[in-house]
Image (tube, helix red, strand yellow):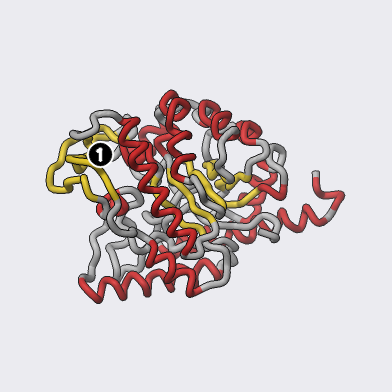
Amino acid sequence: MTRLLPTSTAGSLPKPSWLAEPEKLWSPWKLEGEALVEGKQDALRVTLSEQQRAGIDIVSDGEQTRQHFVTTFIEYLTGVDFEKRETVKIRDRYDASVPTVVGPVSRDKPVFVEDAKFLRAQTDSPIKWALPGPMTMIDTLYDAHYRSREKLAWEFATILNQEARELEAAGVDIIQFDEPAFNVFFDEVNDWGVATLERAIEGLNCETAVHICYGYGIKANTDWKKTLGSEWRQYERTFPRLQASNIDLVSLECHNSHVPIDLIELLRGKKVMVGAIDVASNTIETPEEVADTLRKALRFVDADKLYPCTNCGMAPLSRAVARGKLNALSAGAEIIRRELSTPLAAE
Ligand SMILES: [Zn+2]
């Protein structure tokens, strides 16, 4: 990126109401067959156009072709039985009925590669593509085969690497792995979580990112956040290991959160996607509020490594609210770009 403070989003964006029921996670598709294929592509065109109109620099598919950021990827793999379900506690937080790993897992066909090619054909802007991370994948399954979280994570890392290499060949500029589980299982992150992520990016020449957040603005997450106290220091447990890793960018939650912003210092040297948009609120930030968060972050990350972003995905928000937030992100970043080009105001 040559532009200072290139903006992007953490991942998902709202889907049009003709494709899936709005303001809902895991929303069922409203179309089927060929109409669904075409509908997903049209939605991808729309979300791209909305990002471009808002002035977002690094664009994405807004996850228009997937129902869920983890499950959709797993649906394409063999070794997982979606009919055989067990109840597990996801991220130590809420019970969910999940599919079962019944045999060796493998990826017999590409998952998102055609979608990425389609997006690439629509724009010359840098594109970012999100995949679930190994630890977050194992956390949404019941494992009746490997019976080892670590072993299953290594298997998924190999599979993710296959997909990532093909996404890179399709022209993706940044491949991002979503690892909200990194904010929960600290010992495992340090023992093997980051190592499996490094396995997933092996041999890639494009940039790589990891997104670690406090989740969508759904009730299970907001209830959990209430138990975390006034200072959220979870990042402190994993950032030193990530700083020493091969991952290029770290995407984190900042705006309206209780994360002490000086924890960003632990990543010094890495590019940091600073969440300057709250995805758990319908209130649209003012450009000045966005700028204020970025200004604070600039004390701990060099300007050429600061990537203004959203705290998390915006799939559960209304399209109007999401559009407003994208505009605010762009306008807030522009305020800081102007300040940085005026030497006296740089402080
Ligand atoms: Zn997130």
Q: Name the amino acid, label 1.
A: Leu
Q: Residue at x 21, y 70 (%)?
A: 32
Whether residue 324 is visible = no
Query: In the current view of this chain or complex, which residue is farthest to the front?
Result: 203
Asked which quadrant contains residue 196, the reply is top left
Query: In the current view of this chain or complex, which residue is farthest to the top?
Result: 187
Left or right of 135, for residue 234: right
Which quadrant is home to the N terminus?
bottom right
Which quadrant is home to the C terminus?
top right
- The count of marks equals 1
Whether residue 152 is visible = yes
Note whether 250 is above or below 205 in the view shown.
above
Asked which quadrant contains residue 103, the reply is top left
Note whether 147 is above or below 287 in the view shown.
above
Q: Residue at x 53, y 27 (%)?
A: 233
Residue picked out by circle 1? 141
Q: Position of residue 225 (x, y in %)?
A: 42, 33
Left or right of 14, for residue 76: left
Q: Position of residue 67 (x, y in %)?
A: 30, 57
Q: Residue at x 64, y 60 (%)?
A: 331
Instruction: Say which of 309 and 266 sits in front.
Output: 266
Q: Position of residue 211 (x, y in %)?
A: 48, 44
Query: In the current view of this chain or complex, which residue is farthest to the left?
Result: 84
Q: Position of residue 234 (x, y in %)?
A: 49, 29
